[in-house]
């Protein structure tokens, strides 16, 4: 015996399927995973930027070996902070864990602080004539500054993707699919060490 669905005909069945698909889509079936994957991709960019900064540190340390002996402690601090920062890696699934995100941030902040002292040491080139003869010195300093800028940009983009994801999973009707189907958890934004530090400086008017 034909069912009610069979008697609808081709057009009717298509209409029912379309309405059902639209209803599911409206419940976060597509929007939740899309927003999640976008945030995870932006987190990968953040980690890559931090790793590239870490890769510059040994080169900078080698350049600074001409510094005064009593200031070698600064280099030691930088290398120890680098080792800790590179030892903590967060997978995309970890960015919903505030404790793991905090540990990652603290390690990176420690390296940032060490690099600040390192930069002040190297900036005083007059005190270290040996540095003047190293042609790579200024290039490495420029690379580090550029990398810090990239880090700020990737953090800004990641935080925006997290904001969009967290809004999606809390907003009706997407929240239905987020809770019932995906069991979605809020992601943790990256907290800048100082207000506004996640925003890259504008070069407009300075070139």
Image: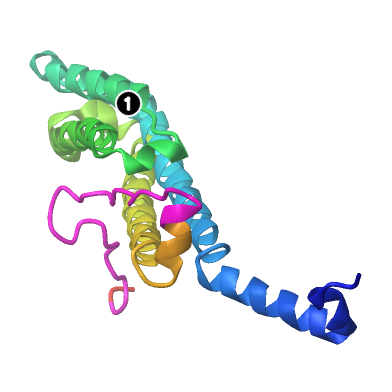
Q: Secondary structure at mark 1?
A: helix
Image coordinates for residue 173, horizontal then vertical, percent: 43, 72
Image coordinates for residue 23, horizontal then vertical, percent: 58, 74
Residue marked by disc 1? 63
The span shown in magenta is 179-205
Q: Is residue 46 above or below residue 160?
A: above
Q: Quadrant of the N terminus?
A: bottom right
Front-most of residues 35 and 24: 24
Q: Is residue 31 above or below residue 107?
A: below
- In the rendered image, is residue 147 in sight? yes
Image coordinates for residue 118, horizontal then vertical, percent: 19, 32
Q: Which residue is depicted at the point 11% across and 20% down?
A: 71
Count the labels in the image: 1
> Left or right of 90: which side holds 104?
left
Q: Residue furthest left?
A: 70
Q: Which residue is depicted at the point 13% across and 53% down?
A: 194
Main SS of the magenta part reads loop
Front-most of residues 192 and 164: 164
């Amino acid at each position: 015996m034909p069912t009610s669905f069979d008697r609808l005909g081709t057009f009717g069945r298509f209409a029912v399927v379309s309405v059902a698909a639209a209803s599911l889509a409206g419940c976060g079936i597509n929007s939740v995973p899309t927003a999640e994957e976008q945030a995870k991709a932006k987190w990968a960019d953040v980690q890559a930027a931090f790793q590239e900064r870490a890769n510059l540190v040994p080169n900078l340390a080698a350049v600074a070996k001409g510094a005064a002996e009593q200031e070698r402690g600064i280099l030691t601090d930088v290398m120890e902070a680098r080792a800790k920062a590179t030892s903590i890696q967060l997978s995309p699934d970890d960015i919903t864990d505030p404790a793991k995100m905090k540990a990652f941030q603290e390690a990176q902040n420690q390296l940032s602080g060490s690099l600040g002292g390192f930069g002040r040491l190297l900036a005083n080139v007059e005190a270290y004539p040996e540095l003047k003869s190293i042609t790579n010195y200024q290039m490495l300093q420029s690379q580090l500054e550029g990398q810090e800028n990239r880090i700020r940009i990737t953090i800004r983009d990641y935080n925006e993707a997290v904001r969009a994801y967290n809004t999606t999973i809390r907003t009706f009707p997407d929240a239905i699919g987020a809770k019932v189907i995906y069991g979605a958890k809020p992601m943790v934004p990256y907290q800048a060490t100082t207000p506004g530090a996640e925003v890259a400086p504008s070069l407009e008017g300075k070139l």
